[in-house]
Image (spheres, grey):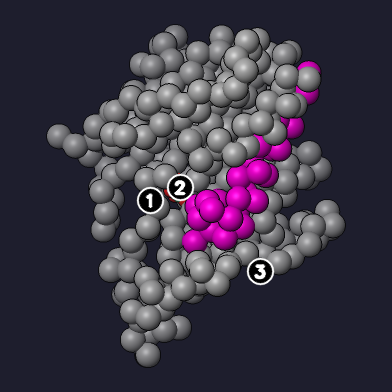
């Protein structure tokens, strides 16, 4: 049995991931390859190339990768100028005695890997940022005073659908998980979300299963949400109960200037999968052995209000 599960915007990477899994490749290689396709997709403004930028108009990327066999992980945060943070994260996992590398260190690593730096913002997305942020700053606070302005500017145009998650089980029963994002549009420079934080936006363990999140990263960090799902499995709860409990555990947490949004995909080691969302109308995708292509499935709604 092999399995590949993703957030809906991962559809563009499913073929690449499945090609690896179905020919006997590893779950880790599959989730990295699948994620790279999404990072290349200029139509996805929440991941990689042409992602929405931070408050200052710079695209700033976060990504993580975890290997459920060894529970080794590699993550990068606040990376500028490289469209494939997932591959930099893979190098952290494979080649460094560390888990997290951020900013200039991650960019240095990318350059040592031979990756080419490039401008990640297109003219079209720069214009969205100008309309949403730059044009609304007073002349005096365009490069300072951002602290006082961030709450009124903090409206992410794609806040329900951002970030990509991939979870995979390979033919040897090993599990891997990957997450990549440009984070919340117009975020404060240097802000890290849940995507590069192991346990928050991404977690997997061959013994139990895996989970990954999209939505308000600050909530998933405070709730350690991905680990919370896998912890439920470890304690004998079923997959759906573990996932529902992890989201319900966020009830009552405040979200300054916004409404709480959380989504997750999760799998158990037997290959069951589930997608949850705090909001209706959202989907995820899954491809299992025996299917000729992936299917799009509804996410079950778990409300955080009331
Ligand atoms: N979770 C991501 C972050 O907080 C954003 C998202 O999923 O839309 O950076």
- Label 2 CB-ligand 1 distance < 8 A: yes
Tag 3: Cα neighbours inside 10 Å, few (<14), some, or many (≥20)? few
Q: CA gap, disc 1 to disc 2?
A: 6 Å
The answer to whether the residue labelled 1 contacts the one labelled 2, judged by CB atoms less than 8 Å apart, is yes
Residue 45 in the magenta stretch? The answer is yes
Does residue 200 appear in this view?
no
In the rendered image, the quadrant that contains the C terminus is top left
Q: Which residue is mark 2?
A: 162
Quadrant of residue 151 within the rendered picture: bottom left
Does residue 90 appear in this view?
yes
The range drawn in magenta is 24-52
User: Where's residue 249, x and y in %?
Assistant: 31, 30
Q: Which mark is residue 119?
A: 3
Using the image as rendered, state which of residue 279 and residue 40 is in the foreground: 40
* Mark 1 residue element: loop
* Mark 3 residue element: loop
Q: Residue at x 73, y 42 (%)?
A: 90
């Amino acid at each position: 049995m092999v399995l590949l599960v993703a957030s809906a915007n991962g559809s563009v990477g499913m073929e690449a991931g499945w090609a690896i899994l179905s020919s006997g490749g590893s779950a880790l290689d599959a989730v990295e390859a699948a994620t790279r396709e999404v990072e290349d997709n200029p139509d996805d403004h929440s991941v990689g190339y042409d992602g929405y930028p931070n408050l200052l108009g710079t695209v700033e990327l976060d990504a993580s990768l975890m290997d459920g066999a060894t529970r080794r992980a590699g993550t990068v945060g606040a990376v500028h100028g490289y469209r494939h943070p997932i591959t930099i994260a893979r190098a952290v996992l494979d080649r460094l005695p560390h888990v997290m590398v951020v900013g200039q260190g991650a960019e240095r690593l990318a350059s040592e890997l031979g990756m080419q730096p490039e401008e990640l913002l297109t003219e079209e997305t720069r214009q969205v940022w100008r309309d949403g942020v730059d044009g609304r700053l007073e002349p005096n606070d365009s490069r300072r005073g951002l602290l006082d302005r961030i709450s009124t500017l903090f409206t992410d145009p794609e806040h329900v659908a951002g970030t990509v998650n991939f979870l995979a089980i390979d033919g040897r029963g090993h599990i891997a998980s990957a997450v990549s994002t440009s984070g919340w549009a117009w975020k404060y420079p240097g802000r890290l979300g849940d995507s590069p934080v192991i346990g928050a936006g991404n977690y997997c363990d061959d013994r139990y299963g895996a989970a990954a999140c999209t939505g308000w990263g600050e909530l998933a960090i405070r709730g350690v949400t991905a680990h919370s799902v896998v912890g439920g499995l470890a304690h004998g709860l079923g997959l759906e109960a573990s996932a529902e409990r992890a989201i319900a555990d966020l009830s009552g947490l405040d979200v300054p200037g916004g409404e709480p949004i959380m989504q997750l995909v999760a799998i158990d080691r037997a290959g069951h999968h589930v997608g949850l969302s705090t909001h209706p109308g959202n989907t995820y995708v899954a491809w299992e052995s025996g299917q000729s292509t992936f299917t799009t499935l509804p996410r079950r709604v778990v409300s955080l209000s009331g």
